[in-house]
Image: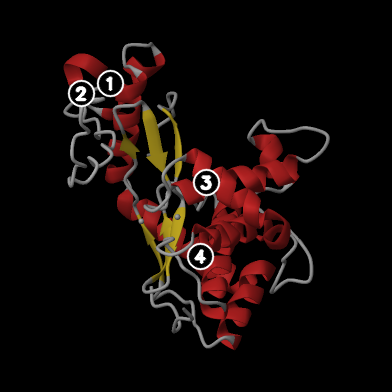
Amino acid sequence: MADSSATATTAPAASAPSTSTSTSAPTPTPTSTETAAPPSSTSPAPVRLPSIVRNDPARTGFNPEAAWWVNYFKIITGQITDEGTFHYREQRYRVHEVRDRERCEAWRDWLFRHSPTVVFMRQKIRDLGGELDADNVVCRRCPARLTEDGAVHRQSGGFSPAHGILICSNEIRDRSHLEDTLSHEMIHAWDALRWKVDWVGDRDLKHAACTEIRASMLSGECRWTREFARGNWKLAQQFQECVRQRAVESVMARPRCKDDVQAVKVVNQVWDSCFSDTRPFDDIYR
């Protein structure tokens, strides 16, 4: 997921405005002092999820009614908070939704014809009785979420065995980024057709952990040039750390995952077998 899988980051800095069972083929989570008290029959209270933060111009400085250049000037001069910058960015995505979608669709069609990885994976999915095309690989705007704990939740794509692949056109930076995202989701599609994957972790989160390890490893999103551009680089094990981190983040996004401790544990349990599994490739090429 992303990058394809869902991610959480702190609120973004200012950015310049623009002018993620064997299935059928995919079709586009009191201590008592004397006697003990009777056991309680009530269920434990559900975990409260952080609320989504809405824009308040008085608090953030971002006025959605003002011209874009007025808000942008206020961002670069420090008059809008990071929270306001988040809301400004989401507004610009809404304004340019059609443009972003059409650009994404043009890149998708080019990759279907010319990307070695995408062409290879498309054929391997056909070999299993599936089909991926413009009908079930769709480009759409994916709204991000800012929650009260300060985390920003975004994704660049996603896969559903019942519907196909979603590409978040507003989050795709360029054609190379789309190639990584599409390759990631196509690995998920192949896994869903090849094995009986417990996709959301209803029975076992190990399935989700394994397919996330494989997708991050084989898609190219963790190659050294990508990591170097992100500012993540060391002399040894950076590739493995990137794959592991992305797999953990994706498992945490599953509704059945309790917390990061469980996600790390599950990823570690399947790491050796899944990191060594490069099918349908012979090796890691990207």
Which of labels 4 and 3 is toward the front? 3
Residue at left offset 49%, top offset 39%: 260
- Percent x, y for residue 41? 18, 47
**Of callouts 1 and 3, the N-terminal one:** 1
User: Alpha-carbon neighbours of circle 2 within 10 Å: few (<14), some, or many (≥20)?
Assistant: some
C-alpha separation, residue under disc 1 versus residue under disc 4: 34 Å
- Percent x, y for residue 169? 41, 53
- Colour option used: secondary structure
Q: Is residue 179 visible?
A: no
Residue at left offset 66%, top offset 68%: 117
C-alpha separation, residue under disc 2 versus residue under disc 1: 9 Å
Q: Which residue is mark 3?
A: 263
Q: Which residue is mark 4?
A: 108
Q: Which residue is mark 1?
A: 70
Disc 1 is placed on an element classified as helix
C-alpha separation, residue under disc 3 versus residue under disc 2: 39 Å
**Of callouts 2 and 1, the N-terminal one:** 2
**Of callouts 1 and 4, the N-terminal one:** 1
Question: What's the amino acid at mark 4?
Answer: Arg
Q: Which residue is mark 2?
A: 63
